[in-house]
Image (cartoon, coloured by chain):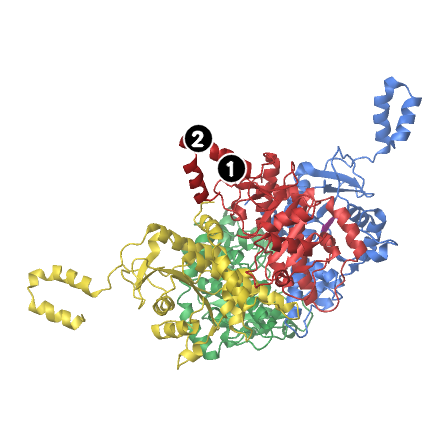
Chain colours: A blue, B red, C green, D yellow
Amino acid sequence: MTSTSRRTFLTSGALALAGALIVRHAAAQAPVSAGPPDPALVDDLVAANRVLVDQGVLDGYGHVSVRHPADPQRYLMARSIAPELVTAADIMEYDLDSNPIDARGRSVYLERFIHGEVYRARPDVKAVVHDHSPSVIPFGVSTVPLRPLYHMSSFLGGGVPVFEIRNASSQPTDMLVRNAALGRALAQTLGARPVTLMRGHGAVVVGPSLPVVVFRAIYTEMNARLQAQAMALGGPVNYLSDEEAGRAEASISGTIPRPWELWRRKALGGK
Amino acid sequence: MTSTSRRTFLTSGALALAGALIVRHAAAQAPVSAGPPDPALVDDLVAANRVLVDQGVLDGYGHVSVRHPADPQRYLMARSIAPELVTAADIMEYDLDSNPIDARGRSVYLERFIHGEVYRARPDVKAVVHDHSPSVIPFGVSTVPLRPLYHMSSFLGGGVPVFEIRNASSQPTDMLVRNAALGRALAQTLGARPVTLMRGHGAVVVGPSLPVVVFRAIYTEMNARLQAQAMALGGPVNYLSDEEAGRAEASISGTIPRPWELWRRKALGGK
Amino acid sequence: MTSTSRRTFLTSGALALAGALIVRHAAAQAPVSAGPPDPALVDDLVAANRVLVDQGVLDGYGHVSVRHPADPQRYLMARSIAPELVTAADIMEYDLDSNPIDARGRSVYLERFIHGEVYRARPDVKAVVHDHSPSVIPFGVSTVPLRPLYHMSSFLGGGVPVFEIRNASSQPTDMLVRNAALGRALAQTLGARPVTLMRGHGAVVVGPSLPVVVFRAIYTEMNARLQAQAMALGGPVNYLSDEEAGRAEASISGTIPRPWELWRRKALGGK
Amino acid sequence: MTSTSRRTFLTSGALALAGALIVRHAAAQAPVSAGPPDPALVDDLVAANRVLVDQGVLDGYGHVSVRHPADPQRYLMARSIAPELVTAADIMEYDLDSNPIDARGRSVYLERFIHGEVYRARPDVKAVVHDHSPSVIPFGVSTVPLRPLYHMSSFLGGGVPVFEIRNASSQPTDMLVRNAALGRALAQTLGARPVTLMRGHGAVVVGPSLPVVVFRAIYTEMNARLQAQAMALGGPVNYLSDEEAGRAEASISGTIPRPWELWRRKALGGK
């Protein structure tokens, strides 16, 4: 409702009823909340923010979200704040158009459309990270593809595309995925894969849960760092074969609770 | 007033009046203070020193200043002390000739002329950092120019010059910007840009506020590190276009309060 | 004993005796414990886990074991848990088939066969580390051999082989040493040496004691990092001669208690 | 007085007086202590050990010494212990043959001869560091010379030799400077300079005081790291000229109290 239409409405109605009517009207228009999420999931989301800082994937920028367990059309993510400072009180609910359900004056991340459009395009995805992970940036501006060189990053086996925002917009951009159209283009580049790089920007990592997406973001960074070192030794690099990558990913994904227990405990101060 | 001239004065005057006369005399000669700055700004300046250490831009050397809000002919900077140790009590006021207004025996940085001459040449500049930021040093001694490879360092889009002190002095130097003439030459190399490297020395970063100059110093370091890594991968590096850099800088500069809140809180022990 | 055979047994026996019989039965079938190890050795094993994390050799993955001093057919290692979280209560006893002696519901590392098979093949070995030490990974996927470039890594003098799991299995693998056959193949590649790399995976380091194996794992990582840097300078690298490596190793091994005292104290919180 | 002449003396004297005589005699034979050093100097030596660990120059190995202010034929250094653990009680006095004056059962560093022989050859030297500083190791095994690329490492301007122990011994060695002859050969390679590298081993850094030698060890490491990065960018590296290095060193050496105050305070827990 714009301020113009609202003024019109107030003029044509009874002033005594205005307050109540506005509320009801707003309730009819605004997206309905999927309800309060499980506090343990909120704690996991807070932990995910801090873990990604602890592990050098996020700095004062970047964000991580989780799909609402009660409604696949909703996701949870912090208000616009540095990830290291996120607490449970900062977690907000968004619809897949990336509108906040109940902003209460809290500001939102400019690039929230990354999350909304990936959740829309990928029903299998339950958690999304957007980061400027340092070792990953060089691969986003290079013609050298990121490839898995050990079992820990075997999830990269299906290839890692690079999102070129110049192809997604008819106009020069500010590099930010600041609207739904750019978010859709990014989701298209991502396709069915777990990771896409973004040229001159960073990466988007997705997964079936917060522990898995955090694990993937951490080992994407590590693989980028180690691949650059392996290439610098000279000579060919012996990457995982597609079959090795597929089998390793199946095995390693079962072990993620082990580091997640460690990371979460340290991030939430339990150590 | 040297101790010689002071002795002369005392000899020729009445001893009972000496103390008062000296004070009045000093007041007539010394530049006038612009008055005590807002304590919140002093806290920001203290925080800026510590943030730049936390982020690896400064070590036991380097300095950061802010223009006095009440008088553009004055700036504030710590006495000669390691940045990590700076407290509010160490902040001094300088005029644009880089004379301290009220030294009270405190020693001053040899290279304070960097600050004074940049403030004189650039009315738009409100804060200045001089650092020996590690990843930046190699670009200062190389023919490879520093260029922005992602949106976070888009402020580098206008190019990054290298100050060659050999061109600024008819004599071999000790590499230090230890007088106003060298400071002016440095400001000339900087021109209207936010960053200049200094060959065999470090960098100078400027901005419209302390949060922005701190942000720029941090991401200049990061860009240098990542650009070196991208080049080492071999093949061409796909830098931001000038138009992308300009648009990204406009957008990113609006987000700086987000990391600044984090950095400041941690630096001042609020975490 | 499967739950089926246990049910059968209970049916055929007197219910009043069941508890005692089960215990006796289990004792007959299960491997016999070599008895509780010296608590100081358990503390050393806990310390070894944490030291290897502190020194960047282990992250949320990897494991370290020690042969049981009372029985060379037994070894001690943590349950499946991130190394940083290991406490004395997590230490379990295994036989050389890598069966836990008294699991009590605790889960075990998938790759415990590395330890069992190395202990079986190498009577001289008293402690084993398996890690994904970052700087070592690139050498495992490269044709460049790891070689000792200073006295601290002189134990590498006999050469560092690379275990190629493709040669050890007729089928594509998930890269994990998840059974005894792969463990034996790994031990064969290791031969009489202190270290083998594992292609696309990590490394195995062995030694005559926990302090020595920890020392070797740390300086294998350091040598890999420094060798890569030395090669990047261009020109030939002047490695230790075989004779220098042999003599240096003999001398340096006598000094290991010095850093071990430091590492252990910090790891166990004594600092 | 040799033990032979001592036996002669005892034989010719009264047995009842033997104890007292031996004591007096021992005092005559053993090197005489130069007396207890100023506790502030001992604190500085303790701080130097810890600062060099904090700054990544030392790990569990390496040592730093200071010449005794009361006697140029004596120096002070810790017993054989990891530098991070050194306290005032660990500081021992040595003569220039590197014999401890009053060991009281405390063990000594194998390579103490580095210190004794450098003090003997260089009356201007008041403090010595021996380290395995990581970034320096590659330059010790390469044909690429270490050269100063910025003012902070201008003390390297006179060139940095590499001690080749193969030239100093007719036999293959264990790489350790474990006797006076090797110490003398090292001191000869060092000559009048502040730093020498040691092939396949580390470096020795000397200076006129503890703050200066610590500063030099830290910025030798930094210069090595940055020089490697500058070379990796490709193209020529623009090093300091000899005249710039000389002038810069004269200026920078006057500023060392500034970082030293910081380093010392943090190392001794004053922060």
Q: Choose between D230 and C190: the one closer to the eye.
A: D230
* Residue extending furthest toward the right: A12
Q: Which residue is mark 2?
A: B17
Q: Is residue A67 visible?
A: yes
Q: Choose between C58 and A11: the one closer to the eye.
A: A11
Residue B33 position within the rendered picture, expressed as x and y whole percent measured from the top left: 58, 36
Q: Amino acid at mark 1?
A: Ala
Q: Which residues are magenta?
A: A125-130
The secondary structure making up most of the magenta span is strand
Name the residue: 18% across, 71% down: D2
Rendered position, B114 above or below D121:
above
Residue C90 position within the rendered picture, expressed as x and y whole percent measured from the top left: 51, 52
Q: Which residue is mark 1?
A: B26
Q: Is residue B247 magenta?
A: no
Q: Amino acid at mark 2?
A: Leu
Residue C45 position within the rendered picture, expressed as x and y whole percent measured from the top left: 47, 57
* SS assignment at label 2: helix
Residue B40 position within the rendered picture, expressed as x and y whole percent measured from the top left: 61, 35
Q: Which numbered disc, 1 or 2, marks the residue that appears first in the sequence? A: 2
* SS assignment at label 1: helix
Q: Choose between D178 and C88: the one closer to the eye.
A: D178
Q: Is residue A204 visible?
A: no
Callout 1: chain? B
- Location of residue C135 by image quarter: bottom right
Determine crowd level at label 2: few under 14, some 14-19, many 20+ residues with C-alpha closer than 10 A: few
Is C217 left, or right, of B95 in this rendering?
left
- Location of residue D111 by image quarter: bottom left
Alpha carbons under labels 1 and 2: distance apart: 14 Å
Determine crowd level at label 1: few under 14, some 14-19, many 20+ residues with C-alpha closer than 10 A: few
